[in-house]
Amino acid sequence: REVTPWVVAVGHRPMYVDSTDWGVEGHAPTAIELQHELEALLVDGKVDLCLWGHHHSYQRTCAVVGGVCVESSGPAAAYAGPVHMVIGMAGAELSPEIEPERPRIFKAVDVTHFGYTRGSANRTHLTMEFASN
């Protein structure tokens, strides 16, 4: 991590999403499929942040592996797992189909505000900010 202190992955359909859409090609079943296909690759590659779209909302998880929050053990810089962000809150109509009670892995879920995300990084900090309309 001397040359590349942060690894960020980007995709369209979210791997973790707070959604009640369980249709055949819905948000929830697609997310589960992506978890089975991609999670080991992301963890092996020590990806710090995953940015997703498709679901028109803002969502942010804890560092999550296997559907549960994980914490690093050891030095403060130790890797725990990727944080997932759904950043689809610009443009189209927002997606209201979320669980009535927020799943534990989600630190933030917003389906009421349009906006965008801006980020900055240096060797020690990666910061993402939701800018609401």
Image (cartoon, rainbow, N blue to C red):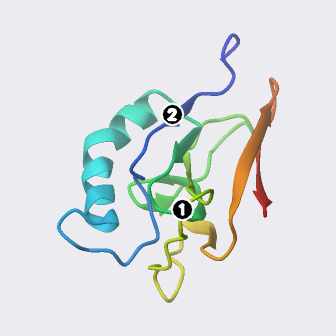
Residue indicated by mark 1: 92
Q: Is residue 13 left or right of residue 116?
A: left
**Which residue extends farthest top?**
3
Given residues 10 and 112, the one toward you in this image is 112
Of callouts 2 and 1, the N-terminal one: 2
Q: Residue at x 72, y 34 (%)?
A: 77
**Which residue extends farthest front?**
92
Q: Residue at x 37, y 78 (%)?
A: 20
Residue kind at label 1, given as amino acid type: Ala
14 shown above or below 22: above
Q: Residue at x 26, y 42 (%)?
A: 37
Given residues 44 and 57, the one toward you in this image is 57
Which SS class for mark 2? strand
**Which residue extends farthest left?**
24
Residue indicated by mark 2: 9
Q: CA distance from mark 2 to mark 1?
A: 23 Å
User: Badge 1, how many Cα within 10 Å: few under 14, some, many 20+?
Assistant: few
Q: Quadrant of the N terminus?
A: top right
Q: Residue at x 46, y 27 (%)?
A: 45
Spot occupied by residue 133 in the image (x, y as percentages of width and height) = 78, 64
Which SS class for mark 1? loop
**Which residue extends farthest bottom?**
100
